[in-house]
Image (cartoon, rainbow, N blue to C red):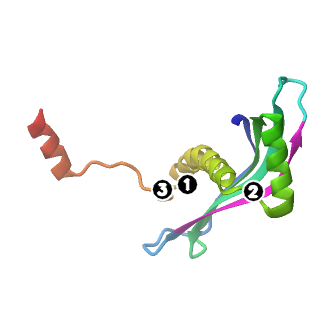
Amino acid sequence: MRVVGFNLSKITAERFKELNENIKFNTKIDIGSISPFKSEVIKGKDELINIEFVYAVLYEPEFAKIEFKGNIILSAEPKVAREILKGFKEHGSSEDFRIFILNVIFRKANIRALQLEDELGLPPHIPLATLRKDQFKQQEKKE
């Protein structure tokens, strides 16, 4: 199974009030639907699956919100594609499949969210690598 498309149809970034120190971050992902996908451009033996999603970063209490709506197109062997579609209709999807999809969304959407956070002057919702003075001195000694 591989990702052949990641498309955003809606991007919303909004800051409601000025920054305060008691901000909490919550991320939310909703998988709307999973359905077969037909394409004249992408051809091959594999079948295509369309997955609709909404990804949101909520800054609480009601400080800001970043939201993406979009879809992922997967290419999978016919047997695997049928299992995914059947499994989703009957009882959701397998844990491995959910983890795969969530990781795709996290990788793509977090990068875009960080860009929007920077433009709106919001703190990043995920920790970024930073250098501390004591780490810098230790690195200089090693060299």
81 vs 24, left or right, is right
Magenta span = 25-37
Q: Which residue is mark 3?
A: 124
Q: Position of residue 95 (x, y in %)?
A: 66, 57
| Residue 53 is a magenta residue | no
The residue to which callout 1 is attached is 120
Q: Is residue 107 above or below residue 4?
A: below
Residue 52 in picture, x, y percent from top left:
79, 50
Q: Secondary structure at mark 3?
A: loop
Q: Which SS class for mark 1?
A: helix
Q: CA distance from mark 3 to mark 2?
A: 31 Å
Of the numbered discs 1 and 2, the one sitting upstream in the chain is 2
- For mark 2, what is the residue? 93
Q: Residue at x 71, y 56 (%)?
A: 94
Q: Position of residue 22 (x, y in %)?
A: 45, 75
Kindly indicate the quadrant of the structure image that contains residue 33. Answer: bottom right
